[in-house]
Image (tube, rainbow, N blue to C red):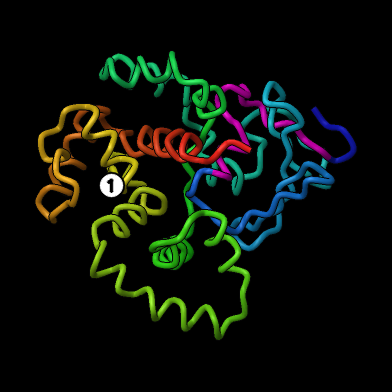
Amino acid sequence: RQVNNWHSIPVDPQDFNLFSTLNSGQAFRWIFNSTLNEWHGVINGHLWRLRQMEDSNPVEYYFEKNLGIKLSDVPFDLRDYFRLDMNLSDLVKEWSLKDEWFENRFSKNCQMDTARGLRLLRQDPEETLFSFITSANNNLTRITKLLYFNLSFICKLILSRTSALVEEPFKVADCICLMSLDKLNVVPIDVHMHRVAREKGIPEASCKNMTTKSYDIISKSLSDFWGNYSGWAQTILFYTRMMESKPNK
């Protein structure tokens, strides 16, 4: 469907929620224009305008060309970046069948309504590396702001944060592998996923602080629970935990 150069992406809205996807701690350079109700960002060197007027509406993109509505006609940059060739509903069913804890959380948690359509992004490795080095000891809002500061400040910041590669080498590396290198079975472990592991009864998660060994065991255990696309399941659970931890306004 085309309306004034806006084209609908033929993916069920339950499988593609734009707000949760771009606000889930995966990418930090998308800008939301609340006046226009649009997201503006760069994929593969091209500026894109995206919108989803309601959660029940399909995601739309602005493109000055008459395209059909077949998924194969959606520009490659969008299909690739949002992994639109993968059926998220099928993955959710798979995770739920593999893990009763995951299934119960999906059926009972109101945050899961929008998380159901959270796509795992396929991002540029270099951008992902700098983003997650910057992310050390920062929240998502501050990371986004930091990435728009001047270059000299960013250089100093990156140098000061390179300790993250020593202090949290597996987490940073796992985020890059998952979000940039198609290692979809990798499960990065942060404080939120540490708590998930504790709730699921993984013994190594009982300690407050993780060691290199316990990190590896927790990550592998969660990967075994959810299978080949466990990193996507982790991204959804991370988002719901993050939303739960935000204070009510």
Q: Nearer the viewer, residue 48 or 27?
A: 27
As for residue 18 lying within the magenta part, the answer is yes
Q: Residue at x 27, y 28 (%)?
A: 226
Residue 233 picture quarter: top left
Percent position (x, y) of residue 95?
Answer: 33, 22
Reply above or below: 16 against 27: above
Range of the magenta residues? Answer: 6-23
Q: Quadrant of the C terminus?
A: top right
Q: Secondary structure at mark 1?
A: loop
How many tags in the picture? 1
Pick out the residue farthest to the bottom.
152
Q: Quadrant of the N terminus?
A: top right
Q: Nearer the viewer, residue 218 or 9?
A: 218
Residue position for label 1? 189
Pick out the residue farthest to the right.
4
Three-letter amino acid code at disc 1?
Answer: Ile
Residue 225 picture quarter: top left
Q: Residue at x 60, y 31 (%)?
A: 17
Q: Nearer the viewer, residue 68 or 128?
A: 128
Percent position (x, y) of residue 139?
Answer: 48, 56
Q: Residue at x 69, y 21 (%)?
A: 56
Q: Is residue 13 left or right of residue 245?
A: right
Reply above or below: 245 against 225: below
Percent position (x, y) of residue 191?
Answer: 31, 46
Q: Is residue 161 left or right of residue 89?
A: left
Q: Is residue 21 left or right of residue 245?
A: right
Percent position (x, y) of residue 224?
Answer: 19, 31
Residue 184 picture quarter: top left
Reply above or below: 104 against 119: above
As for residue 151 lying within the magenta part, the answer is no
Q: Residue at x 46, y 63 (%)?
A: 131
The residue carrying pointer 1 sits among few (fewer than 14), some (14 to 19) or many (20 or more) residues within 10 Å by Cα, namely many
